[in-house]
Amino acid sequence: MKKYFTLILLALLPIVANAQDPVEIDGIWYNLIVKARQAEVTSKPSGSYSGEVVIPASFTYDGKEFSVTSIGNYAFRNCSGLTSVTIPNSVTSIGGSAFYGCSGLTSVTIGNSVTSIGNNAFYNCSSLTSVTIPNSVTSIGEGAFSGCSGLTSVTIGNSVTSIGNYAFRYCSGLTSITIPNSVTSIGGGAFLNCSGLTSVTIPNSVTSIGYEAFHGCSGLTSVTIPNSVTSIGESAFSNCRGLTSVTIPNSVTSIGNSAFNSCSGLTSITIPNSVTSIGNNAFYGCSGLTSVTIGSGMKSIGSRAFAECPELTDVYCYAEQVPGTSSNAFANSYIEYATLHVPAASIELYKAKEPWSLFGTKKATDGSTPEPPTPVICATPTISYAGGKLTFTSTTEGAECVATITDADIKTHYGNEVSLSATYVISVYATKAGCDNSEIATATLCWIDRQPVTNGIIAEDAVNEVKALPVLIQSQAGFITVSGLDAGTEVSAYNTSGMLLDTIISGQDTTTLRTKLPAGSTAIVKIGERAVKVMVK
């Protein structure tokens, strides 16, 4: 027994020896992973952080250099006196509830290496007005920006594939949001009660819209659901009272419970042939609804699906087999004064079954099944720069271009010198009523010195307006195009490991580099001595 006790004691000794209490460096506390030489920002043992905090990329402790790679769970939780945070490029993850309840936080700079933003990371940061989520981020956690009521501008990077449940819930200051083409799913309650939201762009990459995704977005006036979406979740657009137009594509097979509940601004709705089921209360309380068209594929219509729609005058149902329909599907919609239009071959079947038999007038159609018109997709805009102006052009007549431009130079800085890179990241899409939004076009605009030196290398001078030469960098199908160059300028492309992919000495205004990198990869474009990160499309 004594020998057994000794073995247990010896087994515990290495754990104790390797234990590391948090350490404080220049006012910031860290958990150290000694063997990996990595550090995680953690909460203060007592008190809280306040004022402006600039997290370093690395520091030296006990003679060893540590890289700051993460911000731990709850690291700044409820630090109401915190006003700004700069997160360096060394950090790859922001932990759950990291800035939860930082009600005084007005500015946050997220480094370009962060890949994930944890659940509730910025929950109730009510003073935060704008956020740029860099292209390195692939996932936005549940409730990440929930309750950020002061947030008016959000730029979501092109690598984000999922927007978590309740990610932007109660962000009542948001007026518009552009969801990039990388996103495949919009989580439940993602934009719940964003009452100021008037427009939203849902890209063709999205396949599912979660429950309550846009519930209570009372300022939304129109929504076009792309052909990639197969299901509309429960209460996805419920209580969107300002919604007057909805386009449901042929890819959708089911409409969830209460999906459009209380959308009182809707006057008509066309449900395509692909939809086989309409959930309970799906269009309940759509008090302005006058006309409903139901496609030929319909199999079941749930309880109170079209109840409390008192203005309903015409229902067109093209299913030859009478759908299984709840007896109260049209409760309090006064269908005894409305007209039902059904296939001639099936009219007697509809007359024999409630609630269809309760329509005041039944009319036979010619039997043809209308398909909702295939939405026209706006042409993707081209981007050009000349004479100090960016120009966006879509070949779709009447289309309007909506652009988001972020300035990489806008950041908090400490020290006596600031090197201005004057780099702008541009994303733009074309939109038009009755059309699907176009794919998003992206470009990078930066300035280099016009005066070349030895071997075509151009010295960087982003401040001198006389010498500054604007260049526009764009990517498509694995190629990178640089426009606006002087002849003799050396342009090269590298991968993130530093491997040279292609190099050219420009002989004309536009130069094209071949990367051979897959879409979504990052390339480094070097123009003279200037290096710029570009996402390959």
Image (cartoon, grey):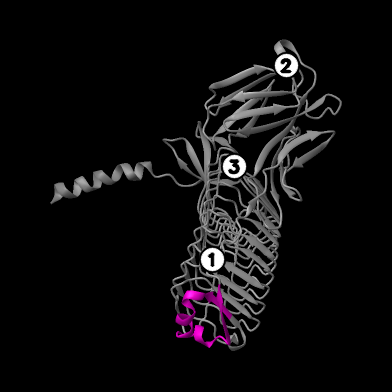
Along the line of sight, which residue is nearer the eye, 415 or 351?
351
Observer-side mark, 2 or 1, equals: 1
Give the vertical position of 332 relative to 435 (above or below): below
Query: Gap between marks 1 and 3, in whole Å?
Result: 45 Å
For residue 213, say whether it is visible.
Answer: yes
For residue 414, say whether it is visible.
Answer: no
Query: Gap between marks 2 and 1, in whole Å?
Result: 59 Å
Looking at marks 2 and 3 on the same chain, the residue that comes earlier in the sequence is marked by 3
Residue that numbered label 2 is attached to: 507
Looking at marks 1 and 3 on the same chain, the residue that comes earlier in the sequence is marked by 3
Q: In this view, does 137 lie to the left or right of 105?
A: left
Along the line of sight, which residue is nearer the eye, 382 or 66?
382
Residue type at numbered disc 3: Asn
**Labelled pair 2, 3 in contact (Cβ < 8 Å):** no
Tell me which corner region of the image, top left, top right, bottom left or bottom right, holds residue 235: bottom right
Residue bounds of the magenta highlight? 340-365
**Labelled pair 2, 1 in contact (Cβ < 8 Å):** no
Mark 2 lies on a secondary structure that is loop
In the orientation shown, which residue stands out farthest toward the right? 466
Residue that numbered label 1 is attached to: 369
Percent position of residue 89, x then y? 59, 38
Residue type at numbered disc 2: Gly
Percent position of residue 205, x then y? 54, 49
Q: In this view, does 34 lie to the left or right of 50?
A: left
Residue that numbered label 3 is attached to: 135
Mark 1 lies on a secondary structure that is loop
